[in-house]
Amino acid sequence: KTKIYHNLRPQVQLPSTNQPLSASEYAISLLRSSSLSLENTISFIDSSTDSRLSYSDFIKQVESLSFSLHNRFGLKTGDSAFILSPPSLQISILYFSLLSLGVIISPANPISTIPEISRQISLSKPVIGFATNVTSSKLPSFLHGTILIDSDDFKSMLTIQPGRVNVRVNQTDTAAILYSSGTTGKVKGVELSHRNIIALTAGFDKVRMEPVEENPPHPIALFTIPLFHVFGFFMTIRAVALGETVVLMERFDFVGMLKAIETYKVTYVPVSPPLVVAMAKLDVVEKFDLSSLTVVGCGGAPLGKEVSEKFLSRFPNVQITQGYGMTETTGGSYEDVRAEETKKHGSVGRLSENMEAKIVDPDTGEALPPGQRGELWLRGPIVMKGYVGDNEATVATFDSEGWLKTGDLCYIDNDGFLYIVDRLKELIKYKAYQVPPAELEQLLQSHPEIADVAVVPYPDEEAGQIPMAFVVRKPGSNLSGTEVMDFVAKQVAPYKKIRRVAFISSIPKSAAGKILRRELIDSIQSTPSS
Ligand code: ATP
Ligand code: MG
């Protein structure tokens, strides 16, 4: 009777569970089995210094660093390492070295404050830190100290002649403790196993995006996403498994990104929605030759249909693929992987390999058929072990049969495509109705005078909550609050109307491109509205 959705693509064979195997060994074995020349293929390019590393040197440096870390500090399986750094070549090498030693990777946002870092450290309990000259002052002292990855000492660890490192990493061992974005409350430490990463990587190996053209150029990706967030973390491992060339930006800026696409003839950019908005709307885009670009892969937060249409009218030769995932599912679970899948505007794609899904009525717990809205539940090999140091949250997130409750309100169509309505926690409760802010934001994004927008609940005596819009006007626009409200009122059911508007200069967003609605809600008292 239960309605369970399975993936519709061919099943992917995973390595046998009891075979000792680290996620890095697995990714590198896929790379080696490809027909690429590892000497002649570039792995990572640091766009700030233009330094680059071939895949054969990448692998050598990973082995060398593993050997050094193992010998000098006796780092072993189950130890955890805290990482605080902007993206760099060294970080990608470090990730692979730590994974191969079975050392748990725990990376945080380099702009984290000391209290944020203390909380993260209390969860991951690191024995060693990796930081830069700039970020290290924020770290406490660790058993084995903090290593500066921009030091000569670190450089020397990359190039010694490596010997044998005798470690056994089981697939069930913890590979990483990644911090969720903290959008809905306290940041949680998500414990991911090597098996989780292997299962995700296996899917990428078998299912590739259909090339837009025949004999496509070697994929060159530009990472605009941070490497400490699950999106950038798994994309790094994916790139190595597939032998892609990755251009890293130490400090993200929009014009720098455009310049890098032009300079490195980038073919692929993984992004969060704010970047698609910027590429669709900003005039500066016209100043660069972006003709190498074939795919923009978007995930992490809702992308409106209007925005992707605007983007595609500017870049008719680029495909926008979407993906949906959470830190708790190693960043994956739904994605477009075939050209025809990208044609379902507004959908985030189809269920990944080896995964199962249900749409559950949040009130009755009943599994729902296609077309009906409910909470998305997921089960399968990419689902996390649990929240580290928070048994209560772990128990609340899983049901007794091992389903992960995503907290996202969604529906699945008859062809197995997933549509995200919004987070359950972020729905605005207007009288007896539920209003998804993401839907109103997408509508408002289509207004020609609106540069950016966020919708939040505003307390109201009679209705409980009313939808309120924070609007960033395009330069030169005199758009009024009434005009904003009328624009929406004409296109939605009465209970969804925007009933209050404030104009601001920018919408606060997280590093992964999520709107920080709580910051806006907290600011309401001090915001004059119209
Ligand atoms: P926290 O759980 O700490 O409150 P978070 O949920 O924002 O933070 P992440 O793991 O970074 O932390 O984000 C996962 C969430 O991002 C998903 O549950 C979903 O709400 C949202 N999301 C991810 N991809 C998409 C997408 N393609 N479209 C819409 N929403 C998405
Ligand atoms: Mg979450």
Image (cartoon, rainbow, N blue to C red):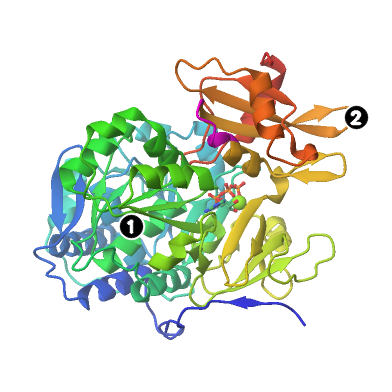
- Mark pair 1, 2: CA separation: 50 Å
Q: Which residue carries the number 1 mark?
A: 236
Q: Which residue carries the number 2 mark?
A: 462
Front one among 136 and 400: 400
Examine the image and state in which quarter residue 243 appears. Answer: bottom left
Give how far across and how far down residue 407 sits, in percent. Answer: 68, 55
- Tag 2: Cα neighbours inside 10 Å, few (<14), some, or many (≥20)? few
Q: Quadrant of the C terminus?
A: top right
Q: Is any atom of residue 167 visible in this view?
A: no
- Report the disc number at residue 204: none
x 56%, y 20%: residue: 504
State left or right for residue 95 relative to residue 16: left
State left or right for residue 490 relative to residue 228: right
Answer above or below: position of 334 versus 35. Answer: above
State left or right for residue 299 relative to residue 207: right
SS class, disc 1: helix
Q: Are marks 1 and 2 in contact (CB under 8 Å)?
A: no
Q: Amino acid at mark 1?
A: Thr
Give how far across and how far down residue 444 sits, in percent. Answer: 59, 34
